[in-house]
Image: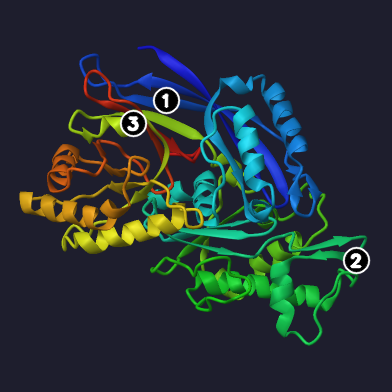
């Protein structure tokens, strides 16, 4: 059986640092000659890891696109790969860099010239999931029953993703990072807006020009560590907290174990910050996290990647063929880069309406930018045995919450792990003839994956590319 090699690149442009990974994947049809083709990655190799460079800015608000492009093309040369050879991967602008004036311009300019990339920008929740995959924490949670929090701390933010049994059960993002206060020659050079906001209640706040050794710097670091501990202990309830970015924590089970990734984690696990050329609070933040009493009550696990977790989490892709038991509206195909959200079903209660409504609300919050709703795929990984009546109730729930917003641009997309796609797709069409529907099955995905669905093949199957934003997958 013939194999095929594809190349992938991951690029992470963060608050403090920018880095890149180039990998190769070997694809092979693992099905027998008489079976429907099933293409899988049988080998993954990191060809080149870039040095970690300081993210270049023209000024405080504008990322230096030219310097980033130069850096990327230099890495391609070192990896001896042409950008045209790259068929998958991700370019991600993370942390406070994502709020810069030209963030989306940078991403689109690079993805136009630097290869075929998957994700443009990642919101903080998705970023946390990508980092957890890259750090190997998602995999660790598959191997143990423990509820594990991955805390990815970079220059400006701490992205927390909580996992159990290989599933993401909640996220939260905090303004906690190594570069929130920067120094130069022992003097405070900059204080980020969230820290200024935090000090509003102080009678004597820190100012630029104060000493780096000022006791108030230590007090700020203690506040940063305290909010991490509070969040992980389920005690963060203040929606207006100046260090909370977005929503309160969304997991509802107590965290048992922690894994730290990101630049600050390199200081935590390696006991010293190797090659740190940055003058900021990162090192002291790492020390304080290590010594905090409440954080010590969790089981501490080691990541596979620290500073490179997010970039390592940016790029594998598997191609699968959805089975012949499918229902698709051929007019809306092909579809590219559709994010997936796992709709958890309680197999005993069959509360379909509640499960579908909750999943759609969460998917909207995760994938929609501002008020623009994006298409996403609802994934049913664990459907119970369904009677004909159950199928109808489930389809009515899907239509109730999705039909009014569907169009040729935003079809209803359902992915099912078992082979119910045809019956569910046909039932939806019988209830409502007008909605465009894509219902595919025998595909294994998880929240945070992206799928491309190709045009219907002569045999009636569709090729599905599952783009898993993780290097350490399965």
Of labels 1 and 2, the one closer to you: 2
Corner quadrant of residue 269 = bottom right
Q: Which residue is mark 2?
A: 187
Judge left or right: residue 444 versus residue 49: left
Is 382 located above or below residue 442 in the figure? below
Does the rendering let one see residue 163? Answer: no
Which residue is most to the bottom?
203
Percent of width and height locating residue 355: 26, 60
Say which element carries label 1.
strand
Percent of width and height locating residue 223: 67, 75
Is 391 located above or below residue 48 in the figure? below
Q: Are the residues at dot 3 and dot 2 in contact (C-beta closer than 8 Å)?
A: no
Q: Nearer the viewer, residue 385 or 97?
A: 97
At a point 60% along the width and 75% down the height, the residue shown is 293
Which residue is most to the right?
185
Judge left or right: residue 21 versus residue 182: left
Q: Are the residues at dot 1 and dot 3 in contact (C-beta closer than 8 Å)?
A: no
Of labels 3 and 2, the one closer to you: 3
Q: Which residue is mark 3?
A: 333
Q: Nearer the viewer, residue 210 or 105?
A: 105
Quadrant into which the C terminus falls: top left
Real-space Cα distance between discs 3 and 2? 58 Å
Q: Which mark is residue 42?
A: 1
């Amino acid at each position: 059986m013939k194999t095929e090699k594809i190349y992938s690149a991951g690029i992470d442009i963060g608050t403090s640092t920018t880095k890149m990974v180039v990998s190769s994947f070997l694809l092979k049809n693992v099905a027998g000659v008489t079976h429907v083709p099933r293409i899988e990655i049988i080998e993954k190799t990191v060809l080149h890891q870039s040095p970690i460079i300081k993210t270049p800015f023209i000024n405080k608000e504008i990322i230096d696109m030219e310097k980033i492009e130069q850096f990327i093309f230099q890495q391609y040369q070192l990896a001896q790969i042409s950008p045209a050879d790259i068929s998958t991967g991700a370019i991600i602008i993370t942390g406070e860099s994502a709020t810069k004036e030209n963030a989306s311009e940078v991403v689109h300019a690079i993805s136009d010239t630097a290869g075929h990339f998957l994700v443009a920008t990642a919101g903080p929740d998705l970023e946390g999931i990508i980092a957890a995959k890259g750090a190997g924490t998602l995999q660790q949670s598959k191997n143990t029953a423990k509820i594990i929090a991955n805390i990815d701390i970079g220059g400006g933010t701490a992205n927390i993703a909580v996992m159990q049994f290989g599933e993401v059960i909640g996220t939260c993002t905090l303004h906690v990072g190594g570069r929130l206060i920067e120094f130069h020659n022992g003097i405070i050079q900059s204080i980020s807006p969230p820290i200024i906001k935090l000090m509003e209640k102080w009678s004597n706040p820190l100012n630029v020009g104060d000493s780096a050794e000022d006791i108030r710097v230590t007090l700020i670091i203690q506040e940063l560590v305290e909010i991490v501990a509070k969040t992980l202990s389920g005690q963060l309830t203040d929606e207006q907290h100046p260090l909370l970015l977005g929503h309160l924590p969304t997991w509802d089970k107590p965290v048992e174990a922690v894994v730290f990734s990101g630049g600050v984690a390199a200081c935590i696990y390696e006991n010293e910050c190797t090659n740190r050329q940055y003058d900021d609070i990162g090192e002291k933040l790492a020390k304080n996290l290590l010594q905090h009493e409440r954080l010590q009550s969790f089981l501490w696990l080691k990541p596979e990647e620290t500073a490179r977790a997010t970039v390592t989490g940016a790029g594998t892709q598997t191609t699968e063929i959805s089975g012949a038991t499918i229902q698709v509206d051929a007019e809306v195909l092909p579809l590219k880069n559709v994010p997936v959200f796992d709709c958890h079903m309680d197999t005993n209660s069959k509360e379909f309406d509640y499960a579908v409504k909750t999943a759609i609300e969460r998917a909207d919050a995760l994938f929609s930018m501002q008020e623009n709703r994006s298409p996403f795929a609802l994934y049913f990984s664990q459907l119970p045995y369904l009677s004909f009546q159950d199928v109808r109730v489930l389809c009515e729930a899907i239509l109730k919450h999705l039909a009014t917003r569907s169009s040729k641009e935003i079809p209803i997309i359902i992915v099912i792990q078992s082979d119910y796609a045809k019956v569910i797709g046909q039932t939806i069409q019988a209830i409502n003839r007008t909605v465009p529907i894509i219902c595919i099955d025998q595909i294994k995905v998880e929240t945070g994956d992206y799928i491309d669905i190709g045009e219907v093949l002569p045999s009636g199957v569709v090729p599905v590319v599952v783009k898993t934003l993780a290097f350490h997958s399965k």
